[in-house]
Image: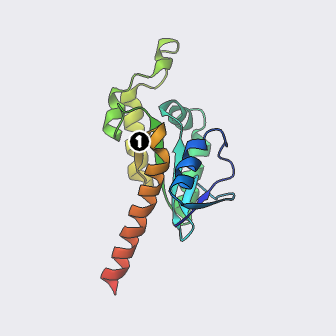
């Protein structure tokens, strides 16, 4: 496996990811990607878009909604399955857990998204764009990226074998 990393990923934000890849002898290259932040170069039709936390996701579905939807539409139009990996806390393990998230912005901005509202929006996004939201702690991001890419590769291999 050789992982492609989007050049727009901030080097400070991905230091632990690169450390994990280096420690596990996983090769990677940096180049601009059409969508997402990570993919296995042998399977460019499956990409992972990393988000630093639920606050960034709120910003994506509110202030940057046009750009966010445009990326999903671009992926869909090109036949790319784009999934999201959200680095948050150990409390958020799956999309359903987002319901109980307490958005810290609600204290100052009563119209900010609640966890319940964000959950509903992301659920619609999953169904509409055939995507999935995965969650992990920041120190596990590298491992989870590799795991998701390997699982997708294995699933693709099994489908090919079944069709043979």
Is 112 on the left-hand or right-hand side of 66? left
Residue 87 visible somewhere in the drawing:
yes
Residue 155 is situated, as x and y percent measured from the top left of the image, at: 36, 68
Q: Residues within 10 Å of mark 1 (few under 14, many from 20)?
A: many
**Which residue is more in the foreground, 149 or 118?**
149
Residue 137 is situated, as x and y percent measured from the top left of the image, at: 43, 37
Residue with the mark numbered 1: 135
Residue 149 is situated, as x and y percent measured from the top left of the image, at: 45, 60
Q: Secondary structure at mark 1?
A: strand
Residue at horizontal 61 percent and vertical 43 percent from the top: 15
Residue at horizontal 34 percent and vertical 38 percent from the top: 93
Residue at horizontal 44 percent and vertical 22 percent from the top: 103
Q: Quadrant of the C terminus?
A: bottom left
Is 43 on the left-hand or right-hand side of 161? right
Residue 126 is situated, as x and y percent measured from the top left of the image, at: 40, 49
Residue at horizontal 33 percent and vertical 27 percent from the top: 100
């Amino acid at each position: 496996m050789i992982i492609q990393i989007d050049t727009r990923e901030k080097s400070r934000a991905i230091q632990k990811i690169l450390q994990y890849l280096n420690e596990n002898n996983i090769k990677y290259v940096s180049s601009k990607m059409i969508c997402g932040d990570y993919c296995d170069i042998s399977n460019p039709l499956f990409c992972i878009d990393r988000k630093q936390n639920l606050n960034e996701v709120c910003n994506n579905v509110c202030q940057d909604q046009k750009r966010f939807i445009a990326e999903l539409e671009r992926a869909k139009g090109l036949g790319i399955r784009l999934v999201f990996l959200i680095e948050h806390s150990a409390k958020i393990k799956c999309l359903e857990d987002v319901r109980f998230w307490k958005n810290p912005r609600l204290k100052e901005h009563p119209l900010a998204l609640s966890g319940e509202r964000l959950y509903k929006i992301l659920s619609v996004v999953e169904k509409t764009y055939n995507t999935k939201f995965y969650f992990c702690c920041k120190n596990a991001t590298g491992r989870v990226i590799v795991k998701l890419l390997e699982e997708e590769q294995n699933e693709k291999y099994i489908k090919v074998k079944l069709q043979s």
